[in-house]
Image (cartoon, rainbow, N blue to C red):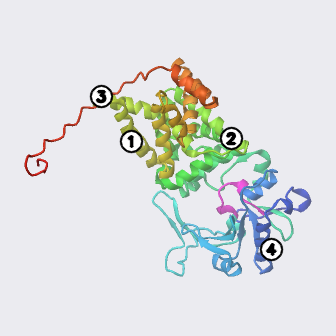
Amino acid sequence: MDNSGTVSATVIPRNSHSISRQDISENALKVLYRLNKSGFDAYLVGGGVRDLLLERKPKDFDIATNATPDEVRKLFRNCRLVGRRFRLAHIMFGPDIIEVATFRGPHDNNEPADDGKARSQQGKNGMLLRDNIFGTIEEDAVRRDFTINSLYYSVADFTVRDYVGGLADLQQRIIRLIGDPETRYREDPVRMLRAIRFAAKLDMTIEPETAAPIRTLSTLLRDIPPARLFEEVLKLLQAGDGHRTFELLREYDLLDMLFPLVAGPLKENPDTPLSRIVDQVLKNTDYRIHNDQRVNPAFLFAVMLWYPLCEHAEKLTQESGLAYYEAFAIAINDILDEQCRAIAIPKRLTTTMRDIWQLQLRLPRRQGKRAIRLMENQKFRAAFDLLELRANVEGRHELQELAHWWADFQQANAPQQRSMVTELGSDPVKRRPRPRRRHPRARQGNGNSES
């Protein structure tokens, strides 16, 4: 950037970078070629270029162009425009979506749009509420968040264009915000989470000036809709680097904004069953992702919130005199309500979390036909996995015995299962006999019951 604030491109020719069209999505290439053929500039940009230069397989291929969203829509019948805050074009190729964004311009060029509304709008904390000012590629480069995401690849001449030193930061493995960090975080507080995610995912270091404001500005995340934060949490913890990400969230005081029920106890005592179970479930999740196995966020959240749930249920029992089962049911509602105020976990997941938690109270009761019925429950396997984690981190003999029993029971054949249940003896938890319901005496003569 020169003294006038103008940036100029460092152009990296084909023989000086590692990007090959063979590694780019065929659909992304179709979009790039059609835009170029129609007289528009178009570049592969963002994480796709970054990952290709790091010789990683990109998850998405995004495109930046000087064509407006309406001009893009006219070129592609399979296009739909999305977003109010940021107007984008989505080119649909079946399940594959290529996102096309028009070059962004600076906010001081804020002429009204055709509908009379401001193209750019900021909230009281500096957060961008609307950003639809279009500009040049040079202006677009400095509007992006991190230098490593501001690299542009052209299929017209196979060059990479770097306006902000992104290639050098990529080589030095540095996460650096473009512009003044505090201003950029205020524009979009989620950038703090993105800095953490990229540092963990790419095994990079957050540059000191980029890192400095994060702890102070962490509370700005309260201005972000909980539904958006839920999506960000999935990206943070279910990308295969969740364990490292979680450590960084704690280090930068961001965990308080996402999991307040977990963050507080971890600060008070870093070596508890809670800390150990969170550590283990995140490592297990990373392992499953790296081995192409399915992961369920409901299980992850159920494990993370298990000990806060137990503590709250115990407190309710002592303070209210309720039976533990009743207090436990109330505690589930309280814990989910508080957690969902931070990140809006959808009902389809909270329903599963409830089932996993409630099964923990049923797993010790195995007499009669209960064990077989429990195994037939759709959430049994997830509940058993939580039981095993609890046994490992708590080390209590009776809990370890229970986990071992269920592990053996699942592997046993039918006669062996019957024998295992018989060896348990009678149910140690006796139900109180239900009082006999007395039927009202019939009124003589008319056959009607008494009112």
Q: Secondary structure at mark 2?
A: helix
Labels 4 and 3: the sequence-earlier one: 4
> Is 202 placed left or right of 276 in the picture?
right
- At horizontal 72% and vertical 67% (from top left) the residue drawn is 63
Of circles 1 and 2, the one toward us is 2
Q: Amino acid at mark 2?
A: Arg
Q: For the residues marked 4 and 3, what is the alpha-carbon distance in whole angstroms?
A: 78 Å
Q: Amino acid at mark 3?
A: Pro
- The residue that mark 3 highlights is 433
Labels 3 and 2: the sequence-earlier one: 2
Could you say which quadrant of the image residue 82 lies in? bottom right
Does 142 appear in magenta?
A: yes
Q: For the residues marked 3 and 1, what is the alpha-carbon distance in whole angstroms?
A: 32 Å
- The residue that mark 4 highlights is 33
Q: For the residues marked 4 and 1, what is the alpha-carbon distance in whole angstroms?
A: 54 Å
- The residue that mark 2 highlights is 288
Judge whether residue 278 can be spotted in this image: yes
Q: Secondary structure at mark 1?
A: helix
Residue 213 on image: x %, y %: 56, 46
For the view shown, which residue lies furthest in the front direction? Answer: 445
For the view shown, which residue lies furthest in the left direction? Answer: 445
> Is 29 placed left or right of 126 in the picture?
right
The stretch of residues the image draws in magenta is: 141-152
